[in-house]
Image: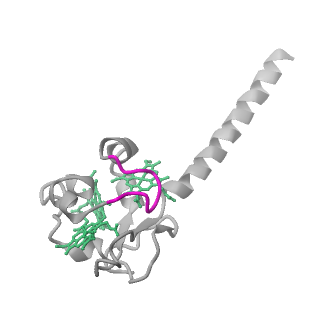
Amino acid sequence: MKRRRRANLGAWLLALAATLAHGALHAEYGDVVINKRSDREGVRPVIFPHWFHRIRFQCKVCHFELGFKMRAGANDVLMNDIVDGRFCGMCHNGQLAWGPERCDLCHSGLKGLPSGIVGGAQTSGPGRW
Ligand code: HEC
Ligand code: HEC
Ligand code: HEC
């Protein structure tokens, strides 16, 4: 009797874990449109392929060490910061990844797209928006 109950608990925990993992996918996948300043400053909105980065780096690299808040549109990112090696610029420095002079690879969104998370499990990639 006791053993049986434990087995049931195990199955229940597995089901719970599966549900949680599934829920988390919605946040991890998709592209993030960052358009807090872009439109206003006359450049196309930024499309950040979250999924592409997420499979290469741990969450904490960006959401702890780099200080990106986990909410689309919540961060104040200036180009000067990027050029100085902060935010995207920690990696997009021409060494770890291509550098900040390649404007169009990041500023690839259509004018007027609001900040937020978009799409499913695939990045649309630069220029395909
Ligand atoms: C590695 C990605 C990346 C590259 C490359 C990049 N940017 Fe940005 N840029 C961003 C992000 C992220 C923001 C914040 C967007 C927002 O809040 O709307 C931003 C914001 C801006 C802004 C508005 C804020 C400010 O500082 O005035 C301008 C203007 C801008 N970028 C111009 C450029 C130009 C010009 C280039 C090429 C010389 C460039 N960017 C290259 C990611 C990039
Ligand atoms: C390469 C950097 C990077 C990595 C790695 C990364 N993120 Fe993000 N994440 C971002 C950026 C940038 C944003 C958008 C912030 C903004 O719009 O101002 C974001 C946004 C989010 C959001 C908000 C989505 C929404 O709907 O508002 C969540 C949740 C999130 N990340 C969770 C995670 C988790 C969980 C992981 C690891 C599995 C992870 N991130 C890995 C950079 C990263
Ligand atoms: C922790 C390191 C890291 C951070 C932070 C980071 N990137 Fe990247 N990013 C990379 C690497 C590595 C690549 C792959 C470069 C290559 O293929 O040469 C990449 C590729 C990309 C691509 C091309 C994706 C594709 O489908 O080919 C875009 C667009 C991009 N990053 C935008 C951004 C923006 C915008 C930010 C900031 C919001 C950012 N990245 C922050 C490491 C990073």
Task: Inspect the magenta stretch and tell me whether residue 128 lies in it.
Answer: no
Up-down relation of residue 58 to residue 30 (above or below): above
Residue 120: percent from left, percent from top? 52, 67
Pick whichever, 28 or 18, lies toward us: 28
Q: Which residue does the image show at 32% across and 79% down from the upper left?
A: 44
How are the colours assigned in the image? one colour
- Residue under the image location 12 percent in, 56 percent down: 95
| Residue 10 in the image, given as x and y percentages of width and height | 71, 29
The correct choice, above or below, for 109 with respect to 9 in the image is: below
- Quadrant position of ligand 3: bottom left
The one of 126 and 104 positioned closer to us in this rendering = 104
What residue range appears in magenta? 67-76
Farthest residue, direction left: 95
Residue drawn at the location 26% of the way across and 73% of the way down: 105
Does residue 91 appear in this view?
no
Above or below, 110 relative to 99:
below
70 in the magenta segment: yes
